[in-house]
Amino acid sequence: MPSNNTVRSSSVHQPDWHLSRLGWSTGLDTSAWLCLILIVVALGLLGAFHQVTLGIVQQSELRLQNISAYNQATGHCNSLSDRIARQNCLSLRQVLASEISTSEP
């Protein structure tokens, strides 16, 4: 008659049968961790690149809008028939252009 004092060793270190059956271990090996870290770093760099390029595009659009407004103001000033009014308009346009250029980052 067997004694009841024996402990089964199979119940102590039994791996997860469903993971080992599929060929996976419960912990990731080093190459999997390295791959995961590289993916996270690549996504972070991609996000940073997106932010930088978005800022550049927005600055370019603002610059083009300012150039267009400046050219329209120049055309308006040059279309004035009175010489003094034209000079005042052009000097005011120059002041506004200098304020716009100093406010841009």
Image: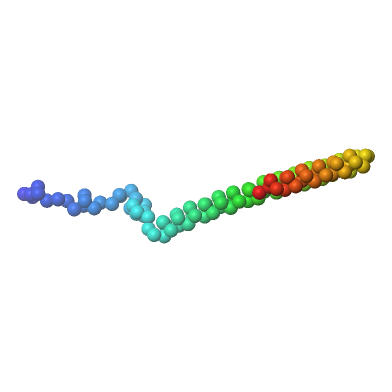
Residue at 52% x, 55% y: name it: 42
Q: Is residue 88 left or right of residue 3?
A: right
Residue at 35% x, 54% y: name it: 27
User: Residue 103 location in percent, x, y?
Assistant: 69, 46
Q: Is residue 71 left or right of residue 18?
A: right
**In the depicted view, which residue is nearer to us: 33 or 96?**
96
User: Residue 9 location in percent, x, y?
Assistant: 18, 53
**Residue farthest bottom in this picture:** 31
Give the answer, above or below, for where 45 lies relative to 81: below
**In the depicted view, which residue is nearer to us: 84 or 34?**
84
Question: In which image quadrant can residue 99 be found?
Answer: top right
Residue at 81% x, 43% y: name it: 93
- The type of colouring in the image is rainbow
User: Residue 47 location in percent, x, y?
Assistant: 55, 50
Give the answer, above or below, for where 77 lies relative to 21: above
Q: Is residue 5 left or right of residue 76?
A: left
Tag count: 0
Q: Is residue 94 left or right of residue 10?
A: right
**In the depicted view, which residue is nearer to us: 89 or 26?**
89
Residue at 78% x, 44% y: name it: 95
Can residue 81 be spotted in the picture?
yes
User: Residue 3 location in percent, x, y?
Assistant: 7, 49
Can residue 68 be spotted in the picture?
no
